[in-house]
Image (spheres, grey):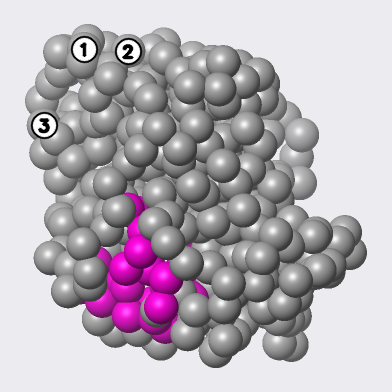
Amino acid sequence: MSSPASSSVPNAQVAPAVPSTSATPAAPSASRRVVIAVFPDVDLLDVTGPAEVFALANRETGGAAGYRVELAGGTPGAVATSAGVRLLTDLAFDEVDGAIDTLLVPGAVDMASGVPVARIDRDVVAWVERVAPLARRVASVCVGAHLLAAAGLLDGRTATTHWSTAAQLASDHPAVTVDPDPIFVRSGTVWTGAGISACLDLALALVAEDLGEEVALAVARQLVVYLKRQGGQSQFSVPLSAPPAARRDIDDLRMYIADHLDTDLSAPALAARMCLSERHFARVFRRETGTTPAAYVEAARVEAARRLLESTDEPLDQVAAGSGLGSVETLHRALRKQIGTTPAAYRRRFRISA
């Protein structure tokens, strides 16, 4: 979605499955039909990003992946996106029939007093209600989650969306558990993704589910993106969670912290690195970042621990050491404080096995 700047608790977040009341979805086949909704002012990357991932999966497997992308719109022809670039639909909404492997629903926003508001197009919602039962799985990109929610597909589920419209989603749909932090969330056969570039993470996760981690990694390499930001990873990393500091040396220090989590990052050590007294350093750091040095360092180490829990099977003592938290006891304490769970529970929820 186009907006001013932009986890499931780390890794692909998997929420409890919700029994479906719809018709039996189509089983996957050698030909994986992907239908993507397009409509006026849809975000361009939300459409073309996943389409490129599926196309590269076909290329990396010599065509064996079998993805076939179709763009469906209100009417056949050109549709202007939020970027001004026009997309050509393959078929109209009322022409979509038959089995669908993946139904992908992006979104669009309107600006109200400078604040992005997810647009609810009733024609799109009605179409989603009709075709969702034809699909093996349904996924939304960015504020497309609002369209899934309006169609009743997210009731009783956990879902995410772009951080800037998460409050709107929660207010409009109290039956949905909205988690504004993850990159994407999987709840049974329904997936929801966060904003903008997270469309690539979501599509890579779908490819990994279909074809395995090795194919997804090969696609990520072709895209020159990091594989994989797990679903539970926050939409904001710790260095990006606060605006740039007025002092360049504080920004440099934040980057130093991120690169040296397993070293001495105590307030005295950081103050010495800044050539400031400990008291003056603490005052400057809090003014520039809105938090204390100790709290900032702990948050950065917890973020690193979450990545390790999501992406590796390393034992907890190695996770604690690699993230700079030191001991398993400290790892447990920090995760309970920061995200309200234990390392084992977090890993069970967000670790995606190959």
Indicate the position of residue 190 as horizontal and vertical percent values.
Answer: 32, 58
Disc 2 target residue = 322
| Viewer-proximal residue among 77 and 108 | 77
> Which residue is rendered at x = 11% and y = 31% of the image?
344
Instruction: Tell me the kind of residue under disc 1.
Output: Glu
Q: Where does the magenta region start and end? A: 130-157
> Residue 301: image x %, image y %?
37, 28
Q: Which tag, 3 or 2, sits closer to the chain's start?
A: 2
Q: What residue is shown with label 3? A: 344
Does residue 275 appear in the picture of this structure? no
Discs 3, 2 touching: Cβ within 8 Å: no
Residue 139 shown in magenta? yes
Q: Residues within 10 Å of mark 1 (few under 14, many from 20)?
A: few
Q: Secondary structure at mark 1?
A: loop
Task: Bin the neighbour count of mark 2 within 10 Å (Cα to Cα): few under 14, some 14-19, many 20 and up.
Answer: some
Q: CA distance from mark 3 to mark 2?
A: 16 Å
Taking the spot 70% from the left edge, 59% from the top edge, the residue there is 90
Q: Nearer the viewer, residue 150 or 328?
A: 150
Circle 1 residue: 314
Q: Residues under labels 1 and 3: Cα distance? A: 12 Å
Q: Is residue 304 above or below residue 186?
A: above
Q: Residue at x 28, y 20 (%)?
A: 354
